[in-house]
Image (cartoon, rainbow, N blue to C red):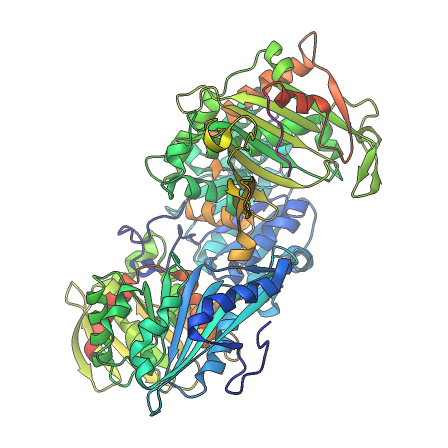
């Protein structure tokens, strides 16, 4: 979160012009520098923040990867990728300046000597550019490479800064595949870097609207008094995609929708909606409150999973009028795959605020429309006056749209013009894109700046990750280990998921919100 | 949809009776139908006494509304005219939304006032504010003395450009009186200060982090190069250093040099040099053998920042430079917001020098 720009401990020349934590000069070392994430997200993000003037000019980027190539070749590849993926059109003069701070370091991830050479190169960069010994290591490599990378960083002494600066590590998801592997990964990371220097990135938290949830809740006095079980009937969180697995079948087959989306993105959104007000906007104050939400989630027994969780897999269908194959016919997918591409859950947060307020979540691929949103459904007005049984008015619904078309809407009742007394729902709608002409930065831009500034608020903490896995593991166990595993339902591509997901709400007299 | 009809005086909208503005605006939006979305986050009033300002300010507002949806109220006052005249026009500035195919539109009310109507500014014009939205008043040129005190009960931010003032101290006194009148609620926004945002950011970044920050204590020399006519901008920049680093003015040497003393009694020599180029084309700070240099790259909207240790260049990078164009200055100002406390401190530190 933005720090107080009047911080007397800070740079006095920043007062009044810094509206966020200030990134510090450093060298960003990217492991997996020739990979997709680097090309599509990291380099375009770094270029954009440089173009916006928010990147410390001393900053250097070192790409660490196996293939042999020169600095110039590496810069050429990155330029091509940045031209394709950057939010802002590449300016030659700015790119030239930025590219001059980018270097390539060739080494195997498991080669100790490569790290010794890296240390020497970083020292040289410190001396040349004045990066003050600050290093930000970004693990953009495959998760099975994290362990050797971290071990070698520690062995080469790169996990500590020699000049009194700092050394931080950004870990990309997945943070493990279950609680045991997450603990193992956390312990490997923890051996090399202390928790306060570990940044687990979940790009959902870098999205403007996700950050705006806290502003909506705690900068407005009107919502918080209604934000509990006295006024909220239920909450729905939806993450719908029209896409299938695309090129990710290898990963997705082993993960499925629950691990891929619910464990991280959706539970993080739930935390932001369900948390208590933090004592301040410091990273740990916010994360302390978020982890309490996950800890308060009612754990599901195998029997509960059968009743409260629905899993599905898309079959052949159509998206936007075009035929779409079933999941099992996708490239690199096992023809008898049991991997879920859709999950719907009914959750309960067992705390004072949310007791008896069901939280419905759904996530799915090959749904008719893409969109991620949170909807808070308020209780109906008392059944008197306008809300008598014969009329049955709709509930007020506050919708926070995360993507696309980020914004907030509120549904309320209004009298239709005319002499008769007809009441209809109307929507007050706020669109970021309409109200603010300036485009929001990409999530990775915000998160990279935060990591350089030492602000971990929008990154997942170890206990958050482990608590989330503990909750998810119970469901996975019921699906895959329990003797009578619940059925994997099919749904046609282009539908809103299996009928059983609708039944999950229908049992409670509710329906999914229409996106 | 600007310039729906072509009025004889200027091409900025449909002429309307002042008493019927609300009704005509409603009609305007009804014509737009489903394809147009009206958006407004602020009331932005632009006041000018320059001839032909309505057309120029309409152009500026049109550009501003690409990033800052607002209800714009553009006022042209003619103090020289002997006739009492109050005319109004309405129009809309529409831009394609970045969220999709919809047109996002901001409405503009334009007023031409002369004679007795100028004294009724608050009554005639500001009755048309979009309720509940903040009110920003951009006053172009010199403020009159006295100003209608009723005005300050409406205004949230007063925007002006002290660069254009002939009598800085007098004008500043009026501005401060206005702020006093509004019980300090009005935020003072000087575009001459906004002009310095990017150069201040470029200078500030040198001193991020504990070690570089220590170097601030050792600054003993500052060189600022400013374009002809922009001495007040350079003085404001000097005031920023003095206010933020705790320097007190100790001596002046003509218009080219000022000496300050820091809290330890050490002297800091500030040299002001006039040169062609951008309002502030360069600024160097010297501290313990290191020069921290920010220069406006020639012919580009970029700042070149570099450090030089004992004559050797150690680091060189480009940063955005901002622009002296009124549209860009206003966009920057509207985007940043904030209480501008540092500005007031900077003014206080060098007020007698501007």
Task: Report if residue A321 lies within the magenta region.
Answer: no
Residue B184, compared with residue A413, is above or below; it is below
Q: Nearer the viewer, residue B139 or A312?
A: B139
Q: Quadrant of residue A313?
A: top right
The answer to whether residue B241 of the structure is visible from this angle is no
Residue found 48% across the figure and 31% down from its top:
A271
Quadrant of the drawing holding the N terminus of chain B: bottom right
Horizontal side of A458 relative to B27 (left or right) equals left
Location of the C terminus of chain B by quadrant is bottom left
- Report the predominant secondary structure element of the magenta stretch: loop
In this picture, which residue range is highlighted in magenta?
A509-515
* Number of numbered discs on residues: 0
Residue at the limit of the structure toward the top, as seen here: A483
In this rendering, is residue A127 above or below A343? below
**Quarter-of-image position of residue B74:** bottom left
The percent coordinates of residue A374 (x first, y second) are: 55, 36
Please indicate whether residue B78 sits to the left or right of residue A400 in the image. left
Residue A256, quarter of picture: top right
Vertical order, B227 against A421 (above or below): below
Residue A79 % position (x, y): 66, 60
- In magenta stretch: residue A513: yes
Left or right: residue B234 versus residue A496 is left
Q: Residue at x 26, y 52 (%)?
A: A8
Image x and y of residue B136, in percent = 37, 66
């Amino acid at each position: 979160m933005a720090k107080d720009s009047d911080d007397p401990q800070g740079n006095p020349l920043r007062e009044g012009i810094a509206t966020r934590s200030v990134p510090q000069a450093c060298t960003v070392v990217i492991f997996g520098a020739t990979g997709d994430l680097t090309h599509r997200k990291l380099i375009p993000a770094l270029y954009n923040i440089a173009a916006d003037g928010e990147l410390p000019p001393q900053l250097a980027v070192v790409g660490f990867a196996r293939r042999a190539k020169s600095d110039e070749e590496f810069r050429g590849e990155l330029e091509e990728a940045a031209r394709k993926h950057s939010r802002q059109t590449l300016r030659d003069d700015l790119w030239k300046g930025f590219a001059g701070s980018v270097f390539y370091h060739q080494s195997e991830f498991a080669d100790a000597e490569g790290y010794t050479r890296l240390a020497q190169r970083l020292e040289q960069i410190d001396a040349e550019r004045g990066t003050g010994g600050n290093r930000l290591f970004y693990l953009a490599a495959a998760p099975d490479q994290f362990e050797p990378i971290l071990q070698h960083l520690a062995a080469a002494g790169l996990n500590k800064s020699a000049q009194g600066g700092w050394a931080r590590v950004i870990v990309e998801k997945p943070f493990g595949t279950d609680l045991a592997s997450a603990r193992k990964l956390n312990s490997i990371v923890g051996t090399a870097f202390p928790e306060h220097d570990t940044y687990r990135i979940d790009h959902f938290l870098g999205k403007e609207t996700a950050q705006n949830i806290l502003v909506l809740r705690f900068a407005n006095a009107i919502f918080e008094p209604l934000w509990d079980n006295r006024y909220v009937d239920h909450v729905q969180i939806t993450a719908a995609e029209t896409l299938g697995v695309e090129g990710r079948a290898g990963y997705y087959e082993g993960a499925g929708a629950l691990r891929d989306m619910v464990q991280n993105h959706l539970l993080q959104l739930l935390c932001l909606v369900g948390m208590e007000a933090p004592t301040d906007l410091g990273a740990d104050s916010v994360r302390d409150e978020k982890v309490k939400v996950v800890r308060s989630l009612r754990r599901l027994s195998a029997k509960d999973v059968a009743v409260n969780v629905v899993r599905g897999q898309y079959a052949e269908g159509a998206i936007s009028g075009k035929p779409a194959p079933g999941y099992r016919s996708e490239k690199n997918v096992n023809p008898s795959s049991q991997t879920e591409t859709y999950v719907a859950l009914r959750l309960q947060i067992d705390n004072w605020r949310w007791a008896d307020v069901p939280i419905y979540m759904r996530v799915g691929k090959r749904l008719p429309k893409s969109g991620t949103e949170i909807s808070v459904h308020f209780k109906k007005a008392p059944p008197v006056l306008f809300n008598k049984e014969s009329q049955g008015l709709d509930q007020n619904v506050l919708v926070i749209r995360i993507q696309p078309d980020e914004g907030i809407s509120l549904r309320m009742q209004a009298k239709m013009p005319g002499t008769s007394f007809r009441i209809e729902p109307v929507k007050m709608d706020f669109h970021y894109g309409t109200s603010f002409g300036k485009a929001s930065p990409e999530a990775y831009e915000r998160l990279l700046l935060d990591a350089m500034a030492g602000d971990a608020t929008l990154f997942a903490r170890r206990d958050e990750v482990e608590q989330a896995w503990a909750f998810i593991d119970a469901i996975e166990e019921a699906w895959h280990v329990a003797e009578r595993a619940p059925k994997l339902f099919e749904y046609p591509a282009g539908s809103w998921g299996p009928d059983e997901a609708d039944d999950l709400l229908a049992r409670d007299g509710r329906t999914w919100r229409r996106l | 949809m600007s310039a729906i009809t072509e009025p004889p005086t200027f091409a900025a909208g449909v002429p309307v009776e002042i008493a019927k503005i609300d009704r005509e605006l409603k009609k305007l939006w009804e014509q737009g139908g489903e394809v147009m979305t009206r958006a407004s986050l602020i009331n932005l009033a632009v006041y000018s006494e320059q001839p032909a300002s309505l057309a120029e300010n309409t152009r500026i507002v049109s550009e501003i509304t690409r990033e800052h949806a607002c209800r714009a109220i553009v006022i042209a006052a003619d103090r020289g005219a002997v006739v009492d005249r109050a005319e109004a026009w309405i129009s809309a500035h529409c831009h394609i939304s970045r969220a999709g195919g919809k047109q996002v539109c901001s409405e503009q009310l334009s007023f031409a006032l002369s004679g007795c109507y100028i004294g009724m500014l608050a009554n005639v014009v500001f009755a048309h504010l979009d309720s509940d939205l903040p009110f920003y008043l951009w006053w172009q040129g010199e403020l009159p003395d006295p100003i209608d005190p009723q005005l300050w009960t409406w205004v949230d931010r007063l925007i002006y450009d002290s660069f254009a003032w002939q009598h800085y101290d007098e004008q500043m006194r009026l501005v401060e009186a206005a702020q006093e009148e509004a019980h300090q609620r009005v935020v003072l926004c000087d575009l001459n200060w906004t002009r310095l945002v990017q150069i201040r950011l470029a200078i500030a970044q040198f001193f991020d982090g504990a070690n570089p920050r220590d170097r601030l204590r050792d600054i003993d020399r500052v060189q600022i190069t400013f374009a002809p006519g922009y001495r007040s901008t350079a003085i404001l920049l000097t005031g920023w250093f003095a206010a933020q680093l705790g320097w007190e003015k100790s001596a002046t040497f003509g218009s080219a040099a000022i000496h300050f003393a820091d809290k330890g009694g050490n002297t800091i020599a500030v040299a002001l040099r006039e040169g062609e180029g951008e309002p502030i084309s360069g600024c160097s700070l010297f501290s313990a053998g290191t020069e921290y240099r920010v220069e406006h790259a020639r012919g580009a909207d970029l700042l070149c920042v570099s450090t030089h240790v004992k004559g050797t260049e150690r680091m060189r990078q480009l940063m955005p430079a901002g622009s002296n164009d009124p549209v860009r200055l206003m966009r920057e100002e509207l985007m940043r917001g904030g209480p501008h406390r540092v500005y007031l401190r900077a003014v206080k530190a060098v007020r007698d020098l501007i």
